[in-house]
Image (cartoon, rainbow, N blue to C red):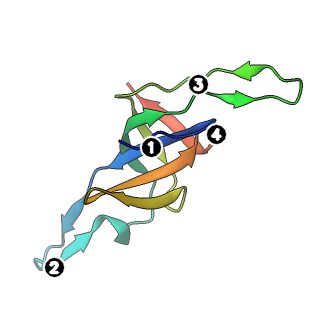
Amino acid sequence: MLKPLGDRVILEVEKEEEKTVGGIVLAGGAKEKPQTAKVVAVGTGRILDDGKKLEMTLKVGDVVVFDKYAGAQVEFEGQEYLVMHEKDILAVVE
């Protein structure tokens, strides 16, 4: 598995499809709304300017909400993931 560095997290994005009334299938990317994903790996935390470490608030298994264009897409062993900074996460779904 990939191991994120610093304050980065790796997300497994849930693919969404929506059918219109006419039966046309729209990919999840066609919608302009925040997306949800499951956290599959977290980094060790961010190092502050004074040298102290700020621990991560997210943990593996959390379901989070993020903006559509946030993060960097990577592919590993045939699976697509998003890598982004913890600060780019909008919310945790409880």
> CB of mark 3 within 8 Å of CB of mark 4?
no
Q: Nearer the viewer, mark 2 or mark 4?
A: 4
Q: Nearer the viewer, mark 1 or mark 4?
A: 1
In percent of width and height, residue 44 lies at: 58, 27
Residue under numbered circle 3: 56
Left or right: 84, with 11 as reference point: right
Residue under numbered circle 4: 87
Q: Kindly report the distance in space between the C-alpha atoms of the residues bearing marks 2 and 3.
A: 41 Å
Q: Amino acid at mark 3?
A: Met
Label located before the other in sequence (2 or 4) = 2
Q: Amino acid at mark 2?
A: Ile
Please tell me how crowded label 4 is: few (under 14), some (14-19), or many (20+) other residues with Cα within 10 Å: few
Label located before the other in sequence (1 or 3) = 1
In depth, the one of 71 and 20 nearer the eye is 71
Q: Secondary structure at mark 4?
A: helix
Q: Kindly report the distance in space between the C-alpha atoms of the residues bearing marks 1 and 4.
A: 13 Å
Q: Amino acid at mark 1?
A: Ile
Residue under numbered circle 2: 24
Q: Kindly report the distance in space between the C-alpha atoms of the residues bearing marks 3 and 4.
A: 10 Å
Q: Residue at x 28, y 50 (%)?
A: 14
Q: Secondary structure at mark 3?
A: loop
In percent of width and height, residue 80 lies at: 33, 58
Q: Amino acid at mark 4?
A: Lys
Label located before the other in sequence (3 or 4) = 3
Please tell me how crowded label 3 is: few (under 14), some (14-19), or many (20+) other residues with Cα within 10 Å: some
Residue 66: which numbered mark, if any?
none
